[in-house]
Image (cartoon, rainbow, N blue to C red):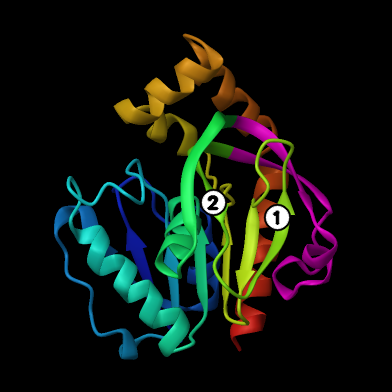
Amino acid sequence: MRLLVFQHIECEHPGMLRTYLSEDGVSWDAVELDAGEAIPPLEDYDALWVMGGPMDVWDTDDNPWLVAEKEAIHRWVRVLEKPYLGLCLGHQLLADALGGACGPQNPPEIGILDVQLTQAGEADAIFVDMPRHQRCLQWHSVCVTEDPADTTVLASSDLCRNQAMRVGKNAWSMQYHVELESDTVRNWGDIEAYRTALEKSLGPGSLEALDTQATEGMADFNANARQLYRNFMDAVR
């Protein structure tokens, strides 16, 4: 199996999911789109993961490569019909690329927060053997406001209706983050846009408190990440 990963900033990589890829001997290539790297021929790959980033789906003037990325996502899911997994921005890009829409999340969701699987989510292959209620890292000021055609909403929260979705039979995405490692919060806190959004929502000095919360919950976060990874791979195969 060959995996292609779209990244939009160096620090938002597959995180803990890299450990599971290594354990399985899965070959993967990351394309750093914000650094000007070109999207390779999609036919050479079996699965696509699209990670998070500080830009918004509509920021095409400042990030013109978003246009080509959305075209690639549309082709991947609708034409090639290959497996897709999107996280945070990757969730929003899936919706936007396939004819849905995104808009401001008001108020933003930032912190260690709860999501709950829908009835459809409990029955979906991506969430097999995973708890109905999950604690996870949220760090977003944009949400999916209009679902693409053939979408099933798989999880939600009090503030965000579409926390996870499946589009068709081959594409899954989550608004929240599952890929946490021990240094994730600190690394993301070094990004000015992320730190500003965090402190605007939770107050000055909130980075240290969030890092402590993430550390305390890391065992559960990693267990959920491993199970979701395994579920995705089982669905792909």
Residue 80 visible in the current orientation? yes
Instruction: Tell me the residue at 17%/48% (across/down).
Output: 61
Residues at badges 2 and 1 in contact (C-beta under 8 Å)?
no
Residue 129 visible in the current orientation? no
**Which label's residue is closer to the chain start, 2 or 1?**
2
Residue 212 located within the stretch drawn in magenta:
no
Height in image: 126 above or below 1?
above
Q: Quadrant of residue 65?
A: bottom left
Mark whose residue sits in front, 2 or 1: 2
Distance between mark 2 and mark 1 Cα atoms: 23 Å
Residue 144 is labelled as 2
**Secondary structure found at label 1:** helix
Residue 224 is labelled as 1
Height in image: 3 above or below 88?
below
Q: Residue 201 location in percent, x, y?
A: 52, 19
Q: Residue 231 location in percent, x, y?
A: 68, 73
Q: Residue 38 location in percent, x, y?
A: 17, 70
Q: Is residue 23 left or right of residue 231?
A: left
* Mark 2 closeness class: few <14, some 14–19, many ≥20 residues within 10 Å: many
Instruction: Tell me the residue at 70%/44% (across/down).
Output: 219
Q: Quadrant of residue 7?
A: bottom left
Image quadrant in which the C terminus is located: bottom right
Amino acid type of disc 2? Val
* Residue segment shown in magenta: 111-137
Q: Residue 107 location in percent, x, y?
A: 57, 27
**Secondary structure found at label 2:** strand
Residue 130 located within the stretch drawn in magenta:
yes
Which sits in the foreground, 160 or 140?
160
Amino acid type of disc 1? Asn
Instruction: Tell me the residue at 59%/84% (across/down).
Output: 236
Residue 5 is labelled as none
